[in-house]
Image: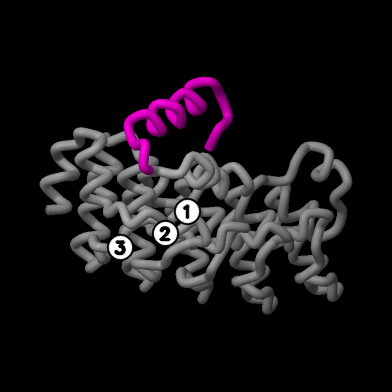
Amino acid sequence: MIRNSNSFLKVLLLAVALPAVDLLVLASGLQPVQAQTAPSAREAAAYDGLHLAAFRGDTAAAAKLIAAKADIEARDSSGRTPVIVAAHQSHEAIVRLLMEAGAYMNAMDYQAYDAVTIAAVANDLPMLDLVLTLDASAANITSPYDGTALIAAAHLGHDKIVKRLIEAKAPLDHVNNLKWTALIEAVVLGDGGPAHTETVRLLLEAGADRTIGDSQGITPLEHAKSRHDSEMVELLK
């Protein structure tokens, strides 16, 4: 995600190191994480009812509202349901309470982000484990880029999240509309450090297809070689 000058420099350096990678795809590949946004201060100030209780983590207020038949699927201005707000705020008790009241665990906001992807991007393993236990799906196609929680987690090198999503049967070889898989993102958008290396290992061990290339047919192995990442090259051979 391009949030500061260091991240922008990373994009430029990658573009130089990997001339075959389309610049638009490279830059856009960083965007799904940035597009996922928690409630802003302005949005939160306008909250009432279940959205306010979910934002604050106020289980007593949430329970009273649910008992009074408040709309558990109400949406804020960005399309977030109370479950999605609670996931952003890491309020596990609220999520559980809403699920017990019948809330839809696979709801998505207007940018197509669900609780699973929110937890994956936040590296919030307890929340991820909870929503998966409560029947949220790891296979949902999310974000404006038709990606998955696994692709987002692989991009960020959240290896423990990747492991849990694999256990939950997340699609290993899903290709988003930028023509990137989780494996490609872990190699190209990763920092080459231990977490991204472990992410690649986990994906390969689970059976991810290392032969799937990007929009120009460049495979993860070829990308790793271009980056002079010897550990990933060994894994991908």
- Label for residue 18? none
Question: Residue 17: x percent and y percent?
Answer: 32, 31
Question: Residue 4: x percent and y percent?
Answer: 56, 24
Who is closer to the viewer here, 231 or 179? 179
Location of residue 49 with respect to 232 vertically, above or below: below
Q: CA distance from mark 3 to mark 1?
A: 23 Å
Q: Are marks 1 and 2 in contact (CB under 8 Å)?
A: yes
Secondary structure mostly seen in magenta is: helix
Question: Could you classify mark 3 by the number of other residues whose Cα lies within 10 Å: few (under 14), some (14-19), or many (20 or more)?
Answer: some
Span highlighted in magenta in the image: 1-20
Magenta stretch holds residue 9: yes
Residue shown at 66%/75% (left/top)? 104
Residue 122 shows in this picture: no
Per the image, label 3 sits on a secondary structure element best described as: loop
Q: Amino acid at mark 3?
A: Ile
Location of residue 81 with respect to 134 vertically, above or below: above
The residue indicated by pointer 1 is: 120
Residue shown at 20%/40% (left/top)? 225
- Label for residue 212? 3
Q: Is residue 157 left or right of residue 36?
A: left
